[in-house]
Image: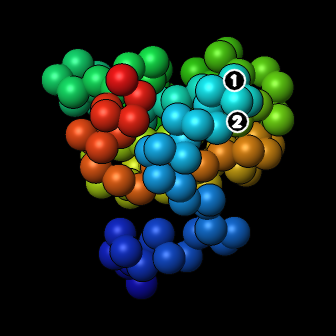
Amino acid sequence: MLLTIPERLAAIDPAPRKITAAEAARERAELNGYVIDVREPAEHANSPANGAINIPRGVLEMKMLELVKDPGTPIFLHCASGARAMLAAEQLAKMGYQHVAVMTCDVPTIQKAFN
């Protein structure tokens, strides 16, 4: 049986932590975490958030091991709709990253929080 994207996202267990952009900006400032934009490079180039690192979901697992070596480092993920970020959070948790959160708001709200 094929799952729709909403069904696939609902099946993520445990569910990734969801936070607002304002919460992510505050935590990043306090804890020195990373903001990762999992959109494609063209999407990121058209509407980047200040300080976000673009690592497309398709290469996330490989690139994160180069960027973040401490599994306790806070990681704040975002995309355009939240779906790719949720799937990315699932994979990072499976890799051993312990503090992964997904920003569930739109890109303009994320840009505002980080600028």
Disc 1 to disc 2, C-alpha distance = 7 Å
Between 26 and 94, which is closer to the camera in this rendering?
26
Q: For the residue labelled by badge 2, is the local secondary structure a helix, a strand or a loop?
A: loop
**Badge 1 or badge 2: first in the primary sequence:** 1
- The amino acid type of the residue labelled 2 equals Pro
Residue 75 located left or right of residue 94:
left
Residue 33 visible, this orientation: no
Q: Position of residue 40 (x, y in %)?
A: 29, 30
Q: What residue do we see at 52% from left, 35% from top?
A: 25
Which label number is shown at residue 32?
1
Where 103 sits versus 35, above or below? below
Q: What residue do we see at 31% from left, 32% from top?
A: 111
Residue 106 located left or right of residue 33:
left
Q: Position of residue 104 (x, y in %)?
A: 41, 56
- The amino acid type of the residue labelled 1 equals Asn
Residue 11 located left or right of residue 53:
right
Colour mode? rainbow
Residue topped by disc 2: 74
Where 105 sits versus 113, above or below? below
Q: Residues within 10 Å of mark 2 (few under 14, many from 20)?
A: many
Would you say the residues marked 1 and 2 are in contact, meaning their CB atoms lie under 8 Å apart? yes
